[in-house]
Image (cartoon, grey):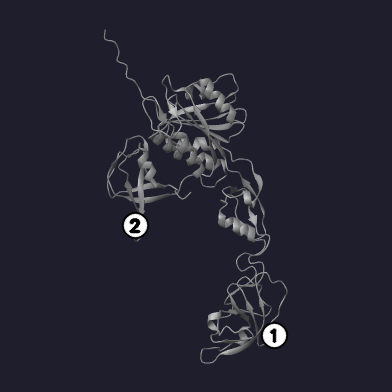
Amino acid sequence: MTAPTTVARTPELAPLAEYLAGVLKTVRPLPVLDRYLTQSYGTVLAREIHAATALPAFDHASIDGYAARLEDIVGAAAHRSVRLNVVGDLGPSSWRPVRLAPGTCVSVAAGAPLPAAADVVVPPAWTDQGMAAVEIREQPRRGHGVRRAGDEIRAGAVIAASGADVTPALVAVLAATGVDRVVVRPSPRVAVIATGDELVEAGGASRPGQVVDANSLALAAAAAEAGAFAYRAGICADDPEALRALVDLQLGEADLIVTSGGTGVGPGDIVRRALGRDGLGGDGVGRDGSVRFTEVSLFPCSSLGYGTLAPAGVPVICLPGDPGTALIGFEVLARPVIQKLAGAETVFRPSVRAHLLETVASPLGLREFRPAHVSERRGGGYTAKPLSAGPYTLSGLATANGLIVLGERVDRSPAGSTVDVLMLDRRR
């Protein structure tokens, strides 16, 4: 009798979109904080903001010149100038009220309070720049050089919605409208741990038996780019007890823990054993939760770990050890989690549709994120050039400004086709 043939089956892959949706459902934005403007940059507003005062707060000159009444200079021209008496001068720090009488004007600096009855500011270039009296040789339109109170923002108007990013420009608007404190979601604190007996600190070349820890440096930088307060918690040897102890130290300090390496099923892959559902110890780490490792339809970086650990329910993300795949995994999973913790309305990168310049092949059944250089075409639209270094290499990711997204049902995208591209933010 012939023995039955056993066929090894590959594990069923979780669809990436469903996996991400499931993870993000479990993530809750961080509790709100009341902060001074000086501490608010980079956070997300948790409440709608109304202007306490108008902007501008008072009528003022927007240019240097002569504040005058338009009716006194009607018809002024180069061949027929109008003469006005200069009865004073005002600077931005002037505070005494001034009213113009007919036939007079006041010399003003940009930002100076506008005298009562004045409705124009005449630029010096349109005059003889006189001091006691001035000859005006050109008639401006009513309101020229003048900014009225509330022209830009009225008192009580909504100036920022809940969920808005606090940018430098928004800080300026808030300060200018009398707001000095805001209620925000704080920047998440992200601890990054790299695992592996072979890892050594940066500063030298890798050699047999030693590999420079590029992962924790890159992932901490990626977390900071995403708006987090990121720090390296250290390199951990392939020792489950040491990893549990290091993670335990971060549970009271971090809002998110990101590990790299040790996500496989080999004897040296200790992250699954230390943090996974079947590898929890009795030391309190993960007592009320665990990290679930899932094979996801993602290329590269198909194996991802996500879960929460007690006592505070801190989320943990476990990424593979290869630096390139770890960075792709970060983009796909960790970055959206950071954005969700921060209370951002949009958690994913902006994307564009681009004209593909070269034919690319992709593994069927996996959603691939291919590093590319994206350019804006003259006349509108974008082009995407896949980087020859390929998806696994650091050099490709280092020069990419976009990631081409090739769906699970795509095994070949010919040159000239249109593809989706995630735009990478390289400004920070």
Q: Residue at x 48, y 44 (%)?
A: 348
Position of 294 with respect to 128 (left or right) is left
Position of 377 with respect to 265 (left or right) is left
**Residue 218 place in picture, x, y as percent:** 45, 38
Q: Residue at x 58, y 56 (%)?
A: 170
Visible residue check, residue 273? yes
Three-letter code, disc 2:
Arg
Q: Are marks 2 and 1 in contact (CB under 8 Å)?
A: no
**Residue 304 place in picture, x, y as percent:** 45, 31
**Residue 4 place in picture, x, y as percent:** 30, 13
Residue bearing mark 2: 377
Q: Residue at x 53, y 43 (%)?
A: 339
Three-letter code, disc 1:
Ala
In the image, farthest residue toward the bottom: 80
Q: Which quadrant does the N terminus fall into?
A: top left
170 or 110, nearer to the observer = 110
**Residue 224 place in picture, x, y as percent:** 51, 42
Above or below, comparing residue 136 to residue 175 in the picture: below
Front: mark 2 or 1: 1
Q: Which mark is residue 260?
A: none
Mark sitting earlier along the chain (2/1): 1
Label 1 element class? loop
Residue bearing mark 1: 101
371 or 193, nearer to the observer = 193
Label 2 element class? loop
Q: How far, Cα to Cα, is label 2 from label 1?
A: 59 Å
360 or 228, nearer to the observer = 228
Above or below, comparing residue 58 to residue 299 in the picture: below
Above or below, comparing residue 239 to residue 383 in the picture: above
Is disc 2 surrounded by few (<14), some (14 to 19) or many (20+) residues within 10 Å?
A: few
Position of 294 with respect to 62 (left or right) is left
